[in-house]
Image (cartoon, rainbow, N blue to C red):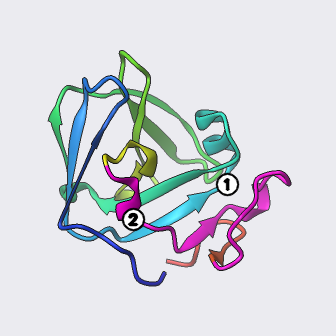
């Protein structure tokens, strides 16, 4: 999916600071997700996700709360967030398996990453403008 800018360790956490995490190593991908679940979970037109392997992501403070539902694929999707301030942190689930999708906005330095693709473009809202230079996929890209 193109080159991904990265620092050797990315740090982040929730709005109130009760939950903190570290990501070690380069992300697998950085994408804008326009699916309806992300729209409803964030209250906006899309979310920016940083894909990392579960072994790259370490919770260093606190314990996230979770909410699980069924995604479009029929598999479970679990959102991890702060139980105090409700700040979204990352998503896990059946379909991504060992991949965690960290919310880019929860990074201490969101400019350390840059999206290279857009997924679930089929659900994009007309008023949510998309960078035309992003690689676009109607659903998920082929594995």
Which residue is painted at 39% across and 76% down in the image? 4
**Residue 85 visible in the picture:** yes
For disc 1, the marked residue is: 34
Query: Callout 2: 10 Å neighbours few (<14), some, many (20+)?
Result: many
The correct choice, above or below, for 55 with respect to 76 in the image is below
Q: Secondary structure at mark 2?
A: loop
The answer for how far apart the CA atoms under marks 2 and 1 are is 18 Å
For disc 2, the marked residue is: 113
Counting the numbered discs, the total is 2
Q: Residue 109 appears at what percent x and percent y?
A: 33, 52
For marks 2 and 1 on the same chain, the one whose residue lies earlier in the sequence: 1
Task: Specify start and end residues of the magenta stretch as a single range.
Answer: 109-133
Residue at the far bottom in the pictured view: 2
Whether residue 139 appears in magenta in the rendering, the answer is no
Q: Horizontally, is 125 left or right of 44 in the view?
A: right
Query: Callout 1: 10 Å neighbours few (<14), some, many (20+)?
Result: many
Q: Horizontally, is 119 left or right of 75 in the view?
A: right
């Amino acid at each position: 999916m193109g080159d991904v800018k990265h620092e050797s360790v990315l740090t982040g956490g929730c709005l109130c600071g009760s939950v903190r995490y570290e990501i070690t190593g380069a992300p697998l991908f950085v994408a804008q997700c326009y699916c309806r679940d992300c729209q409803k979970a964030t209250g906006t037109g899309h979310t920016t996700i940083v894909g990392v392997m579960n072994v790259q992501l370490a919770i260093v403070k606190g314990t996230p709360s979770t909410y699980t539902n069924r995604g479009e694929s029929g598999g479970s999707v679990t959102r991890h967030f702060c139980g105090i301030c409700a700040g979204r942190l990352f998503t896990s689930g059946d379909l991504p398996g060992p991949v965690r999708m960290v919310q880019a906005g929860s990074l201490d330095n969101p400019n350390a990453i840059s999206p290279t693709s857009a997924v679930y473009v089929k659900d994009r809202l007309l008023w949510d403008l998309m960078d035309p230079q992003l690689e676009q996929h109607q659903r998920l890209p082929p594995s």
